[in-house]
Amino acid sequence: MLLKPEELLEEARKLIGSETEVVRGRYPVEHDPIRRYCHMTDDTNPLFLDTEYAEFSRYGSVISPPLLIGYFTGNGPWPPADGSEPSLPAIPSPGDRLINLTTEWEFYEPVKIGDRLSYKRRVADVFIKGIRLDSKAFWVKT
């Protein structure tokens, strides 16, 4: 018997609070990806690009732009990941897809060159919100 969307939502909401284990990023933070990112996004902040300027700032060295943190916590483009990183449990949905509505990051201190970052994922909320592509899509906040 197929469950109604509201029943599936009730099952999906039981997964709120589920977390992965802490995962360490594959590579340390490096200046070259920071530089390339800044040039692609036209971000000329000298704290990200100018080593001399950053050295005499309150941070003491180049720091990473906040949104680039996802790059340094990910698997990177090569070599392919072995698939062993922990994932969140599968969330049941009456629609064809799940949509990650938002992702929140917590920064405890500036990220500097040479840092090794770790992350974990957590299901914070699940709700139904139809979109043009899928009127029954579940939205997931991690």
Image: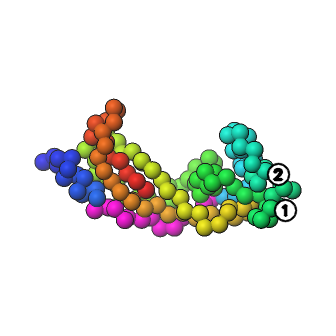
- Per the image, label 2 sits on a secondary structure element best described as loop
Q: Which mark is residue 56?
A: 1
Q: Is residue 129 above or below residue 107?
A: above
Q: Which mark is residue 12?
A: none
- Among the two numbered marks 1 and 2 on one chain, the one whose residue lies closer to the N terminus: 2
Left or right? Give the position of 92 relative to 26: left
Q: Is residue 42 visible?
A: yes
In the depicted view, which residue is nearer to us: 6 or 32?
A: 6
* Quadrant assignment for the C terminus: bottom left
Magenta region: which residues? 14-26
Q: Quadrant of residue 109?
A: bottom right
Q: Is residue 57 magenta?
A: no
Q: Quadrant of residue 72?
A: bottom right
Left or right? Give the position of 85 relative to 112: left
Q: Which mark is residue 50?
A: 2
Mark 1 vs mark 2, foreground winner is: 1
- Check the image and name the residue furthest to the right: 52
- Check the image and name the residue furthest to the top: 132
Q: Is residue 68 above or below residue 41?
A: below
Give the residue type at disc 1.
Phe
Q: Is residue 24 magenta?
A: yes
Residue ID at (73%, 55%): 30
Give the residue type at disc 2.
Asp
Residue 56 pos. (x, y %): 84, 62
Residue 112 pos. (x, y %): 72, 61
In the depicted view, which residue is nearer to us: 26 or 60?
A: 60
CA–CA distance between discs 1 and 2? Answer: 10 Å
